[in-house]
Amino acid sequence: MISVDILSPTMSRHLDVDCIFFPGVQGPFEVLRNHAPIISLLEEGKIRWRVGGAEDSMEVKGGVVMVKDNAIKVCID
């Protein structure tokens, strides 16, 4: 599992996911376990994630994501 913390000025959310998809400014990308460290800006779109066979998502207007050691921190607008 990948630990994901999503923070905004109005909420915080913790998820444990199998994989997660981000709307990066240079194109959408997926993060799986043991992904290389990365910091990326996000554009408006959907963050989507999978846990088991179920998929869920949330709309974002932009933000930044940091991936390191199977932990993801996301700050969104």
Image (tube, rainbow, N blue to C red):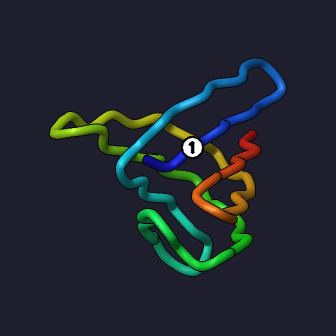
Identify residue type, mark 1: Ser
**Residue 48: x %, y % from top left:** 39, 46
Tell me: 34 left or right of 50.
Answer: right
Q: Nearer the viewer, residue 31 or 59?
A: 31
**Residue 4: x %, y % from top left:** 59, 42
**Residue 21: x %, y % from top left:** 42, 58
Q: How many labels, in total?
A: 1
Residue ID at (50%, 49%):
2
Residue extending farthest top: 10
**Badge 1 local density, few (<14 within 10 Å), some, or many (20+)?**
some
Toward which corner of the image does residue 14 lie, by quadrant?
top right
Q: State whether residue 40 is above or below residue 5.
A: below
Residue extending farthest left: 53
Residue extending farthest right: 9
User: Where, quadrant-wise, is the C terminus in this rendering?
Assistant: top right
Tell me: 7 left or right of 2.
Answer: right
Residue ID at (45%, 70%):
28
What residue is disc 1 on?
3
Does dot 1 land on a helix, a strand or a loop? strand
Toward which corner of the image does residue 25 lie, by quadrant?
bottom right
**Residue 19: x %, y % from top left:** 38, 54
Residue ID at (30%, 38%):
51
Residue ID at (21%, 34%):
54
Q: Nearer the viewer, residue 77 or 40?
A: 40
